[in-house]
Image (spheres, grey):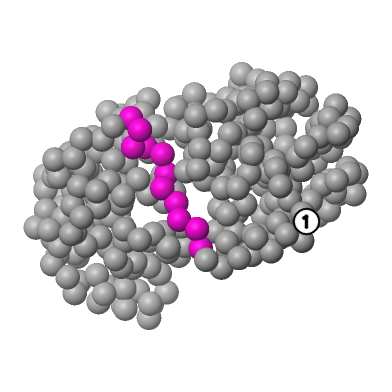
Amino acid sequence: MILLTPMFSILKENYPDSTIDVICGTKNYSIIANNPYINNIFIFDKSPFKLIRFFNQVRETNYDYYIDPKDHYSRESSILAGMIKAKNKIGFKSDERSKFNLGIPTNKENEGKHYSEKILNPLKYLNIEVSDKSHKPVLFESPESIKYFQEFREVNNLDKYIVINISASQKRKMWDKEKWVEFINSVNSKYEEKDFDFVITSAPTESEDVKYIIENTSNLIHFQSRNILDVVSLIKNSWLLITPDTALVHIAAAFNIKLLGLFANNPFFYSMFHPLSDEFEVVMTPEGSENIDDIDFTQIYEAFLRISEKL
């Protein structure tokens, strides 16, 4: 969803009087809840009562275009495309029986392209040319999260700060807590009178790891986010984000925040999800490994020293 957000601003820029409705999942709708370019958000909730309500909602309007940017077959995409009323339906055509009348390139044809680039392919049918500068996410803060962050900033007397995120979607994408301790202590030792703070954040599942890291380091501030939009406000105002490969990489890109990323050595996925910030350092696992914990402490420390010169 984060990587799809450029589409909404591009559509509004080219068609300012258009109405844009978006179908979302239950876990990603909050990312666009404050997006001024979007008129209606329909949440695809599979619980029976909510599913019936959803079907009724999306069938109320006759659209000029229905866009599904997936470049591969999806059963749900096919069902929705058959159900929604639209003059033109843009999406992946698996065969001649496809519900989409306007086809987009397949995942094989998109090979080597960043996900944010290939997801904009449908715009060609609306006579929109997409420039290389159009691929960065476009995010809008929540008023509640802005207030929450400002209060956090005032309480902790924060000025310049670096965000450390230790969480990722899978354990193999996470760095060991002992290595985080070693890294933070090493930076603190090098910069005894540093003019920035470290702010650590994580998903609730890593709260015990955060507690351990705080207990074994000094001058580390914990940001307890309530939701992803709190994290958006935190990252937007930061100097630098240090994180494993996760959605936060793309939140940083939305505000062009400098990044130090820990990535698995997988060229296929890296080509699709590499950082889009102008300034970034990436440290990868050794060849043949996709376990982030195989990254050595010195690699991250040296990468930090390189990017800190650009702060």
Residue nearest the viewer, comparing 177 with 94: 177
Spot occupied by residue 87 in the image (x, y as percentages of width and height) = 9, 58
- In the picture provided, is 78 more to the left or to the right than 149? left
Crowding at dot 1, Cα within 10 Å, few <14 / some 14-19 / many 20+, comes out as: few
Examine the image and state in which quarter residue 154 appears: bottom right
Residue 5, above or below 154: above
What type is the residue that disc 1 sits on?
A: Asn
Residue range (magenta): 132-142
Label 1: which secondary element = loop
Residue 39, above or below 71: below
Examine the image and state in which quarter residue 34 appears: bottom left
Magenta residue check for 140: yes
Residue nearest the viewer, comparing 151 with 290: 151
Spot occupied by residue 124 in the image (x, y as percentages of width and height) = 17, 39
Seen at 17% across and 70% down, the residue is: 61
Magenta residue check for 69: no
**Main secondary-structure element of the magenta-colored stretch:** loop
Q: Which residue is mark 1?
A: 156
Spot occupied by residue 132 in the image (x, y as percentages of width and height) = 33, 30
Seen at 27% across and 63% down, the residue is: 21
